Image: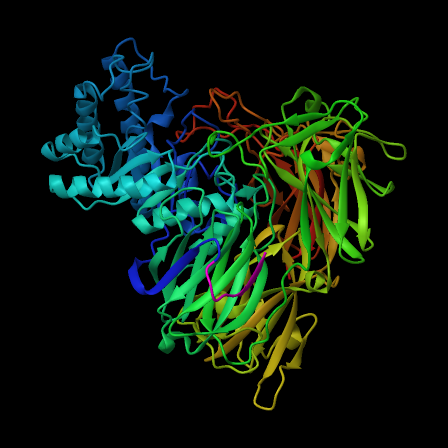
Amino acid sequence: MAAETSAAPVSGNLTIDLGTDTGPFHGGASGTLYGLYGDGVPSRNAVEGMYVRTVSTKAQDGTQHPGADALEILRPFVEAGGKDVYVYMTDIYRGFPYEWPGDTGAERLADFTARVRRQVEQVLTLGAYKSHVVYVPFNEPEGNMFGTGEWSYDQVSWRTDPGHYFTAWRDIYRLIKELDPGARIAGPNTCLLYDEVRGFLEFAKAEDVLPDVITWHELTSPDEIRTSVAKYRALERELGIGPLPVNINEYAHNYHLSVPGQMIQWIAAIEESKVDGDMAYWNIDGNLNDSVVEANKGNGQWWLFNAYGQFTGNTVRVTAPHPNVQYTLQGVAVLDRAKRQARVLLGGAGGSADVVFEHVDSEVFGTTVHVRLLEIPWTGQVGASAQPLRLADHELPVVEGKVTLRLVGLEAMSAYQVILSPGGEGAVALSPSVGWRRSYQAEDAAYIGDGHSLNGPEGSPSDVDKFAGSTGYHVGGLRTGSDGVLVFSVEVPRDGTYDVSVFANSHNLADAVREQGPTNVFLRVDGSHPQELRLPLGYKWAVWGHTDTRVELTAGAHTITLAAEDPDLGVTRGDAVVDRLGLALRDDQVTAPALYDAEFAVLGGGARVDYAQRGASGPGVAVLPRGGTATFWVHAADDGEATVTIDRIGLGEGELTINGENVGMVGEVDRGIAGGGDMGIAGGDDMEIVERSYVPLFLASGINKITIAGTSDRLVLDRLQVGPSRGLLPTSTHPAEEGTTTGSARVTGAHTFATGGKAVDGIGGGAANALTLTVTAERAGRHALTIRYSNGEQAPATHYNPDPVCRHADIAVNGAAPQRVLFPTTFHFNNFHDLSVPVTLDQGTNTLTFTADELPDHDGHSRNQYGQRSAYAPVIDRVTVTRLA
């Protein structure tokens, strides 16, 4: 992928008309159906940084799926910036279609009515949080309660005879409003915006039971979003109602979800329509619809929504090469005149295109613009992603109000962001994040030995229920008992260290995978330097993640092999499929600290961007008054210490927080921070001195929120840099088997991928079954516990959604009240992940006690009867203790 100036169109123009305002930025596409399991899964960072606006989820204590209980996710969701929780009241029931009890329709409706009453009474206990609840009385009524199936009211579709449905809607609506006069109610929540919805609206208007929010599902295509919203708005005008808020609370298919180049097409349509939308729930809950890996790592889709959520100002008109046509280049753009920035997200097609900015106002941008181009690549459904890649950073002249950026080598699965800001102040152009990269498809590789299979096609525009892959085909054969070798012929431009990413998958419930968990294979370069790799597990076949390593290569041709047996290292156990192999050169730019410019950060409290500051690393700086804030969303590959460098111009002061933890001051008290500060001369006699502070911080693996708040009258922030550890934070590691176990908790050697082959299992089922570890702290204060754990528990599912269960641990420090921590699935009890938890430790010796027990329902007495609330903590391998700062 490259960018350059252009004088003529290539395969098509994406035109950004900065002179045509289409309304305030709405941000409605970042909604989720069943995307939150509970507090911590996903992490609050993951929720806040994705700017999730709405969530649709099950009724409290519903038996439809594990987790995602409305009243349990409500508070953490709102505290992470969320707006509304849409409660699917029907999901109190098991099954889909819903298995509501009763021999007649009247009996079934009576049971449901009683359950609705209890749900509303629960909400009435929430205090101020109640205002964030939206009730959804019926879900897809034409295929469920008022359809033609076994579990319907009378086996007659309401689309044929709406009488029973309309009466039920009226009576349930009035019951909710009677109990909660301020309630908001959403509907009709049909699969599509059927023509019969007109009759529903006419009835609802006549009976004074119109929904407060209009909802339906668009499991169609992005072009139907625009068409359906326009159709609905026309209905409102004809019927004399509204305009009402709209939430398209299920959108997109398996083929689209996780793929930035696909999802940008949906985002563009939803944003243009100024409605809300919730991504559909096809797989597991608690991962924001295939956006979050583990609890706190974002994949490519997460970073797309992170970029979308940081839009400010007003949207402007975007004209695509093929307007409103799916699987073509589409985009969405905003102009923030106060910030003097235009931002564009685009994607959906490979090849090349011109991005043409028209009506570039010289009063906003001047006569030269600074252009930053970023790529948000697809990294798989369960493959974590670093921050977006910087592809280009340069300045272009504005010619007759126009700037044209030619993009070549576009990847159809990637999304791209262009940020336009004023230039001409001497900003130094930054190099691309990666010097060279290439992908090699598994189906193009040679295969030696037995067991080979070419699998596919997977998802495609004509088969959107299946998952996306880099080509739709993948290769199997590396499994237990095989002698197969997958041979990739590669060629690299120069000597160096190369990142290798193997995009692969093992289905966690496949027979050959159940025994060991992660499938192990063996990598060699030119027949030498063997490495054992463990390939990613997923909840189904063709759910892609990536396993990463590094190799040393000389310039020229090489052979990289993945084998099921190795003479030095052993044999494969399991069964894996491989999608592709990726190579990227780790040159000096890649090993340098990651850069986060303050002028592109999230600003609040009166902070502003200044483009006239000489000596800045980019086109501008952020100027923070007292109380002003700049927030950076920062990626960390692993849990542990990182060196965060804060560059500022002048001597302003600020307060630094990391993931909500206050860790000290930046400014004249730098002398008190380990590492101190130094000064860098930016260059030139008229340039100011850059003050540089080095702060060792504990970063959680994945997504971190770093905020600097001004504590002086003026703090000029240039950028953050995030680099490797300098070993300044005290750290100690404590194997679980060295702790004290009581009751059924026990040390076991059954988990071969635990450290040293030993871990502690059986914690939970009551406080008597516990693990206690003794740890030490050099100083009192806040520390991170990085817990290496496994959790393969999965509840019986009623339909297509796998239902993994989050286990929890109640962690007590020095006998104090325990902190409850949720641990997401690792897809197998022999597959270990890390989860970091902040705690306060005393100086010297501390005890950590892990217990667990099954949580009751909201009433405090009844219990879930389908194995959806675990009584146990995860298997614990070890705990690493690190000072936060």
* Residue 229 part of the magenta segment: no
Where, by quadrant of the figure, is residue 334 drawn? bottom left
User: Magenta part of the protein: which range?
Assistant: 1-9
Q: Residue at x 32, y 21 (%)?
A: 143
4 in the magenta segment: yes
Residue at image position (52%, 69%) is 598
Report the side of 2 relative to 337 (left or right): right
At x 72%, y 23%, the residue is 515
Residue sitting nearer the eye, 786 or 777: 786
| Residue sitting farthest toward the right | 568
State the image coordinates of residue 612 (x, y, percent, origin top left): 47, 81
Between 32 and 543, the residue placed more toward the observer is: 543
Q: Quick check: 211 left or right of 664?
A: left
The location of residue 267, given as percent across then percent down, is 40, 47
Can residue 360 be seen at all in this image of the molecule? yes
State the image coordinates of residue 201 (x, y, percent, origin top left). Answer: 17, 33
Q: Quadrant of the C terminus?
A: bottom right
Q: Residue at x 55, y 70 (%)?
A: 394
Is 412 placed above or below 317 here?
above
Dividing the image into 4 quarters, which one contains the N terminus? bottom right
Above-or-below relation of 364 to 228? below
